[in-house]
Amino acid sequence: MTMKFRRFLCFLTALLLISGCAGKEDGKKYPSEYETSPNPKMSELRLPSSPGEQVAVDSSGLVQIDYSNTSSGYLQAKLLRKPEKRMRLQITKDGVGNIAYDFTKENEYETFPFEQGSGTYLVKVLENRSGKTYTITLTLSLDVKLENERIPFLYPNQTVNYDSHTAAVKKAFELTKDDDTVLKRIATLYNYVVDNISYDSKKAKEVEDIYVLPVVDETLESKKGICFDYAALLAAMLRSQQIPTRLVTGNTTIEYHAWVEVYIEGKGWINPEILLHAKKWSRMDPTFDASDIDYKDDYEDKYYY
């Protein structure tokens, strides 16, 4: 056991005796012990499916949506053929959210989460006409009743994308094989990302004005990335270990940023999250931690993935 890991566990034991910290967690008490649990198995990995029980096709005949598994926190959608114009998928809940996704594959389902919990979602397929003008080619109103509020963050999706063949998932199982509690698994995976992935300043400049989806295995192999890459890699590894994990994007006083939040059964979302160098519950921010940035200002959540 490394000195850093021992220090982290000591911090964690002490912290769990303290009533929460700033923000939503004020007044919440964390127990000093966390029960042991069996290691997750690869066969238990939660992966999305498209059984075809509830399917819709947009009026252009270009996009098909399978919404058979809304209770598991996601829908799947795919381009049926290569479009001549840009097609997008927009998902909102109760008029809030307004996330618009681009399709990245042809004739292959991609997964999109119901990240705002149970409720009524409007799903729209948009076809670009010119410039920033789009025509709605399909509207679905879905009454989503989740099995639980954490379940969307246990599955892969377009942003946190992985399966049983993903190297990052295999690495997560390898790294945590001797960990007997959820907290140890969180610490192991967090430390791995912080210690092994460096910030890619060149990429940060290249993607400054464009949206580029993270690819977790590229980050793992290259050992570098921007905040989106750090957060997606850590989220994928944690989800593979049955730890509900939200990838969050939003604003800091430094930059538009991405980080992660984890849910511990019986304790709730740790928000803000664990920073390994602080004796308090704080945000789990692998980018700032890996860059030795002691960021203490506000985070403003915007989107969950």
Image: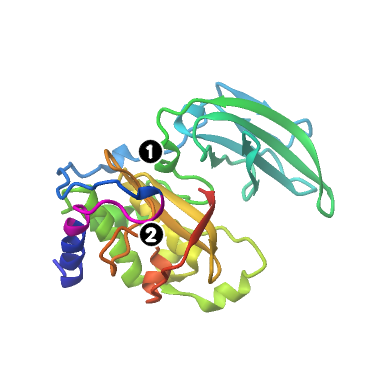
Mark 2 or mark 1: whose residue is earlier in sequence: 1
* Residue toward you, 107 or 133: 133
Q: Which mark is residue 46?
A: 1
Q: Is residue 21 covered in magenta? A: yes
Q: Is residue 266 visible?
A: yes
Q: In this view, does 234 lie to the left or right of 120?
A: left
Residue 196 to residue 130: above or below: below
Residue ID at (18%, 41%): 38
Judged left or right of residue 96, residue 59 is right
For disc 2, the neighbor class at 10 Å (few under 14, some 14 to 19, many from 20) is many
Magenta stretch, residue numbers: 13-23
**Magenta region, main secondary structure:** loop
259 in the magenta segment:
no
* Colouring scheme applied when the structure was drawn: rainbow
Q: Is residue 294 positioned above or below 10 on the image? A: below
Say which mark, if any, is on residue 283: 2
Q: Is residue 12 left or right of residue 139?
A: left
Q: Residue at x 24, y 46 (%)?
A: 29
Residue 69's spot in the image, x, y percent? Answer: 50, 28
